[in-house]
Image (cartoon, helix red, strand yellow):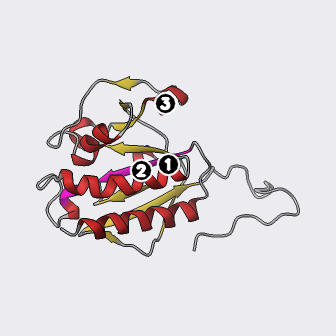
Amino acid sequence: MLFAKISADTEKAARELLARASLRPGQIFVLGCSTSEVQGKVIGKGTSMDVAVAILKPLLKVMKENELHLAVQCCEHLNRALVVEAALAEEYEDDIVQVYPVPGAGGAAAAMAMELFSEPVLLERIRAHAGMDIGQTLIGMHLRPVVVPVRLSIERIGSAILTAARTRPKLIGGNRAAYCKPGSLPPGPEK
């Protein structure tokens, strides 16, 4: 594996997504990651802590620079619980759950997040503002409605398919509703 390329592609994808998602400091970015898929293996069949480090370190750097919270999704064996910093759990008043992710139950990314975060705790669910899904791990349950896919220049991290998304507020009302301040232009479609 070319860990430097994995790290560089992860950082580039994250920066590109943040530029298009317009997140504000304090908002949440969720990561779903199959280190097996990154290596070209079947999800859950080739867990790698080295790949997890290559993905998490640049993400943590980018999140810190942008004052964002990172939530790392566990695998289905832990019901896709999320590793977050304790401060995030307190800020959003979410209930902490008791479990410790390991590579075979939780996944390498979540297990490595437990090592790299300052005060890691696990939450059962979260409502993130944007996220990246590396290897089709299905992060949608942890994104706020309405999810908008974002096409990035990076389509794969290693061998894994990369899917990125941002969210936007729901549009409510009807044909007489205004979705922006009168006289200003509404947000354009995603390009």
Name the kind of residue labelled 1 in the image: Lys
Q: Report whether residue 139 is seen.
A: no
Q: Which residues are magenta?
A: 27-36
In the image, taking residue 182 as reference, residue 179 lies left or right, namely: left
**Quarter residue 11 falls in:** bottom left
Main SS of residues in magenta: strand
CB under 8 Å between callouts 3 and 2?
no
- Residue underneath mark 1: 64
Callout 2, which amino acid?
Answer: Leu
Q: What amino acid is at disc 3?
A: Ala
Can residue 161 be seen here? The reply is yes
Q: Could you tell which of marks 1 and 3 lies nearer the N-terminus? A: 1
Callout 2: few (<14), some (14-19), or many (20+) C-alpha neighbours within 10 Å?
Answer: some
The answer to whether residue 66 is above or below residue 19 is: above
Q: In this figure, which residue is indicated by the disc labeled 3?
A: 87
Corner quadrant of residue 114: top left
Q: Which residue is mark 2?
A: 60
